[in-house]
Amino acid sequence: MLLEVESAKSAAYYGLWCAAEQNDELPSVASLAKAYCSEAYFHATAENIQIHGGIGFTWEHPAHLYFKRAKSSELLFGDPTYHRELLLSASASELISRSAPASAVMGRPATCHRRS
């Protein structure tokens, strides 16, 4: 759990640095940081309830509030799967824009001829 939390802090700090420096990597880093931090937060809160046992999900202990906050932020800002798909689509579109046309890759000329 400590490793996940420290890794999430590092991802968040790198995202903040990219935002402060107006780095070109900001959209992908933000999605990656949100996905990882959301998973780490949810896992840490779920483990917190398990560690505290029965009292962890009662009104007498605030652990359930953190769990509910983690779940609500996942619903409000997007779950990790959504942010990974966002990252994948951005990476795929960037890769496609950088690559050569498919006809040139296959050894055919890039022009298209119609048959009449």
Image (cartoon, helix red, strand yellow):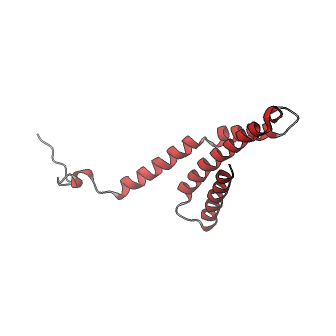
Q: Where is residue 3 in the image (x, y as percent from the top left)?
A: 65, 53
- Residue plotted at (19% across, 49% down): 112
Q: Is residue 69 left or right of residue 40?
A: right
Q: Which of 91 and 109 is in front in this view?
A: 91
- Residue plotted at (46% across, 47% down): 89
Picture mark count:
0
Q: Nearer the viewer, residue 11 or 112?
A: 11
Q: In which quarter of the image is the C terminus?
A: top left
Q: Position of residue 38 (x, y in %)?
A: 64, 46
Q: Is residue 20 above or below residue 108?
A: below
Q: Residue furthest right?
A: 60
- Residue plotted at (17% across, 54% down): 107
> Residue 78's quadrant in the figure?
top right
Q: Nearer the viewer, residue 6 or 116?
A: 6
Q: Position of residue 108 (x, y in %)?
A: 17, 52
Q: Is residue 51 left or right of residue 7?
A: right
Q: Position of residue 33 (x, y in %)?
A: 60, 53
Q: Which residue lies furthest to the bottom in this view?
A: 21
Q: Is residue 104 above or below residue 81?
A: below
- Residue plotted at (80% across, 36% down): 56
> Residue 27's quadrant in the figure?
bottom right
Q: In this view, does 17 lie to the left or right of 93?
A: right
Q: Which of 36 and 89 is in front in this view?
A: 36
Q: In this view, does 27 lie to the left or right of 51?
A: left
